[in-house]
Image (cartoon, rainbow, N blue to C red):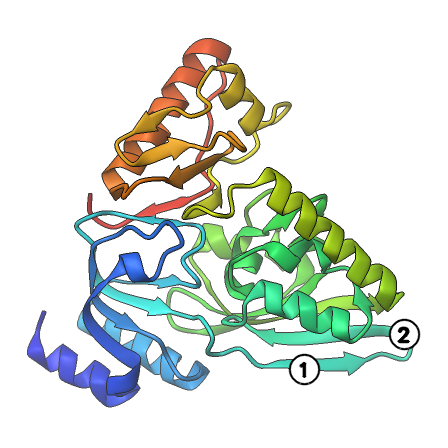
Amino acid sequence: MDIDFKKEILKIAGETCVKFDEPMSEHTTFRVGGPADVLVTPADEAQFIEAVALCKSAGMPYMIIGNGSNLLVGDKGIRGVVFKLFRTMDHVSFEPQEDGRVIVHAGAGIMLSRLAKMAASEGLEGLEFASGIPGTFGGAVTMNAGAYGGEMKRCVISVKALDTEGHVLHLNFDQLEMGYRTSVIQRCGYIVLEASLCLKKGNQTAIYSYMDELAVRRKEKQPLEYPSAGSTFKRPEGYFAGKLIQDAGLKGYRVGGACVSKKHSGFVINDKGASAADILQLIHDVQDMVMEKFGVRLEPEVRIIGEF
């Protein structure tokens, strides 16, 4: 990488926020992935926008990650710059409305689970489903994350985003075009800077009780004790991915250190020192065998990036 670019990115973000040749296995919940040329954890929105502008002017490829919870990075790593919006750009404010609702403004880098707990502490309902989702708020809005019958589109009302030309956009709900695990943000390559939710006052005891119930269900049904990226495949229309995989006889199916969870077939786990190549091959095998047996093509929910 050009030494002048290194100097410029350090000038913008500082040594504490920039790492070179950083192993992505340290930044993904799969615990795999080779080195990124540059990893930047921007201190604030202004610094992030300036660093993105530098990448664009220098012709340097870049990408955005949050907590790395829905990500598979190749063993050879990532060329260019990775911006990690996690535990930074994580401001939160609550704006009560006359009708009793509350508008919640939050930065892209806050953990979604933390935001859900903050909402609960304010006695606000509507975000309980997100209390166990391990990603960031920005990533959750981008992919319209959901669980247990809830999804982000039910509470998001607006988003502040950066477009591919470096311009700041303000998008209302209708402009977001949020669907199952997708949005206009994802399709157009925009970057969430912050977003606003509309929640309503509820019974705080009931809110906490429901969150506790979901936590028990997750622990009982999901392989939380192993590195994974959560649900590996999107739900195909009319089917459940986990059931298709199980009915194909693939529960416990293994490629190297990667394995289809015996606890929940919808999860691919890093069982014994898997490589990214092991995990990717297992994903392809599952797709092929489910297609052969049931005529259904499973689509990964996990983002697959970098060099393998």
Left or right of 308? Residue 156 is right
Numbered marks: total: 2
Q: Amino acid at mark 2?
A: Gly
Where residue 100 is drawn, which disc sits there? 2
User: Is residue 148 or residue 303 the one in the foreground?
Assistant: 148
Where residue 152 sits in the image (x, y, percent)? Answer: 65, 55
How crowded pointer 1 is (Cα within 10 Å; few <14, some 14-19, many 20+) is rated as few
The residue sitting at 68% across, 44% down in the picture is: 217
Q: Is residue 175 above or below residue 170?
A: above
Question: What whole-number distance in Å separates the C-alpha atoms at marks 2 and 1?
Answer: 16 Å
Where residue 235 sits in the image (x, y, percent)? Answer: 57, 32
Work out which quarter of the rendered image holds the C terminus and state it.
Answer: top left
The residue sitting at 70% across, 74% down in the picture is: 104
Left or right of 129? Residue 4 is left
Q: Is residue 183 above or below residue 278?
A: below
State the residue lying farthest toward the top: 293
Q: Is residue 129 above or below residue 103?
A: above
Work out which quarter of the rendered image holds the N terminus and state it.
Answer: bottom left
How crowded pointer 2 is (Cα within 10 Å; few <14, some 14-19, many 20+) is rated as few
Where residue 93 is drawn, which disc sits there? 1
Q: Earlier in the sequence, mark 2 or mark 1?
A: 1
The image quadrant of residue 273 is top left
The residue sitting at 54% across, 33% down in the picture is: 264
Q: Is residue 12 above or below residue 114?
A: below
Q: Amino acid at mark 1?
A: Ser
Q: Secondary structure at mark 2?
A: loop
Where residue 137 sits in the image (x, y, percent)? Answer: 56, 65
The image quadrant of residue 80 is bottom left
